[in-house]
Image (spheres, helix red, strand yellow):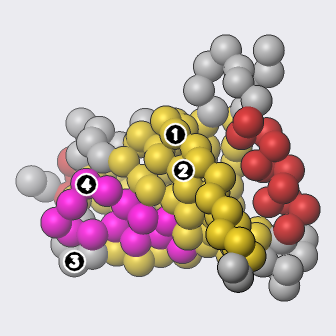
Amino acid sequence: MAASEFNEITEIQMSLQLAEHHLQHNPFQEQLHLSLSLVSIARGSCKMIIRPDGQRAPSFVGALHIPADRAVMQATISLAQKPFDDLAQKLRQSGPRPINLLTTLDKPLSVDYNGILFIDPPVDAAITNLVWTIPLK
């Protein structure tokens, strides 16, 4: 395929399928485990783990790993405790449509005009921004 048949993207749109709040009491740790389907990429999903981090005020740190051999991305996000608590509360509310997430990466990905992502070798990217769209009732 010619290079002109590909788009370079730095944003991935996702739709929330499942959210779970995991609590471990000894030692106390909590995490949000999210399963997201990809919207802006034709096939695949993303498993995201979000953790509170008392050192992160007011921003966040995020990373995304895209393996070359599987259609499942893995993302990890560290948020300050208050934004973590706020997000967990918002995820509990059910709305008329699924929650969407727009993730911005620090490096471009190659996607063809059919939305197929081409990865070789695996990609590790920093997540530079998260935009949540949470429908209201």
Location of the C terminus by quadrant is: top right
Q: Which residue is mark 2?
A: 34
Say left or right for 28 vs 56. Answer: left
Q: Residues within 10 Å of mark 1 (few under 14, many from 20)?
A: few
Q: Indicate which disc, 3 or 4, sits on the residue closer to the N terminus.
A: 4
Q: Residue furthest front?
A: 26
Percent position of residue 72, x then y:
31, 56
Q: Nearer the viewer, residue 8 or 100?
A: 100
Q: CA distance from mark 3 to mark 1?
A: 29 Å
Asked whether disc 2 touches disc 1, contact meaning CB atoms under 8 Å apart, the reply is yes
Q: Nearer the viewer, residue 116 or 8?
A: 116
Q: CA distance from mark 4 to mark 1?
A: 17 Å
Give yes or no for residue 40 being in the magenta stretch.
no
Q: Indicate which disc, 3 or 1, sits on the residue closer to the N terminus.
A: 1
Q: Residue at x 67, y 14 (%)?
A: 96
Q: Which residue is mark 4?
A: 71
| Residue 127 seen from this side | no
Q: Residues within 10 Å of mark 3 (few under 14, many from 20)?
A: few
Q: Which residues are magenta?
A: 63-75
Task: Tell which tag, 2 or 4, sits nearer the viewer.
Answer: 2
Q: Residues within 10 Å of mark 2 (few under 14, many from 20)?
A: some
| Residue 77 seen from this side | yes
Q: Which residue is mark 1?
A: 18
Task: Give, as a three-letter code, the residue at label 4.
Answer: Ala
Q: Indicate which disc, 2 or 4, sits on the residue closer to the N terminus.
A: 2
Task: Give, as a three-letter code, the residue at label 1.
Answer: Leu
Q: Which residue is mark 3?
A: 121
Task: Give, as a three-letter code, the residue at label 2.
Answer: Leu
Q: Where 17 falls versus 51 (above or below)? A: above
